[in-house]
Amino acid sequence: MTSLRIVIGVLIAAAVGVALVPLAVLVDLHDGGTGWGLCHQGLNGCRNSYFAGFELFAGVAVALAAILAVIHLCVRLLRRLEMHATDRTTERGPVP
């Protein structure tokens, strides 16, 4: 059960990391970078389609949805395992 809790913690950290990607892109653009390839000449020479921001948003949303779905499944599995462990200890009765 401990390993499942570690997996859940790693998945939560991954979700936070994915959620911070747009912020990192904006900070990179602000500092004169390419926005991780979004604007090749920097912000002043950026000539992207109207859908470039939406594509980034859609990618982040799909990645977050997938990670959150896996977190949900792991939490349900953890609850089920804990419930079965509790049932087994109550069936044995008190330890003398």
Image (cartoon, helix red, strand yellow):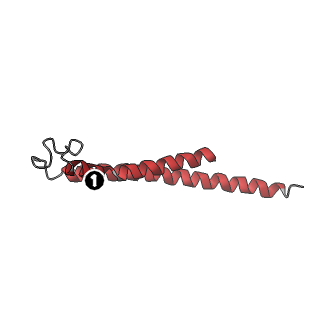
- Observer-nearest residue: 21 or 95? 21
Residue lying at 66% horizontally and 54% vertically, measured from the top left: 82
Q: Secondary structure at mark 1?
A: helix
- Quadrant holding the C terminus: bottom right
Residue 90, image x, y percentages: 79, 58
* Residue 42, quarter of picture: top left
Q: Residue lying furthest front in this view? A: 31
Examine the image and state in which quarter residue 38 appears. Answer: top left
Identify the residue position indicated by label 1 in the image: 57
Point out residue 66 in the picture as x, y percentages from the top left corner: 41, 49
> What residue sits 74% from the left and 56% below the top?
87
Viewer-proximal residue among 33 and 92: 33
Q: Residue at x 55, y 54 (%)?
A: 75
Say few, some or many: other residues with alpha carbon within 10 Å of mark 1 (under 14 / 14 to 19 / 20 or more).
some
Name the amino acid, label 1: Phe
Q: Is residue 75 left or right of residue 66?
A: right
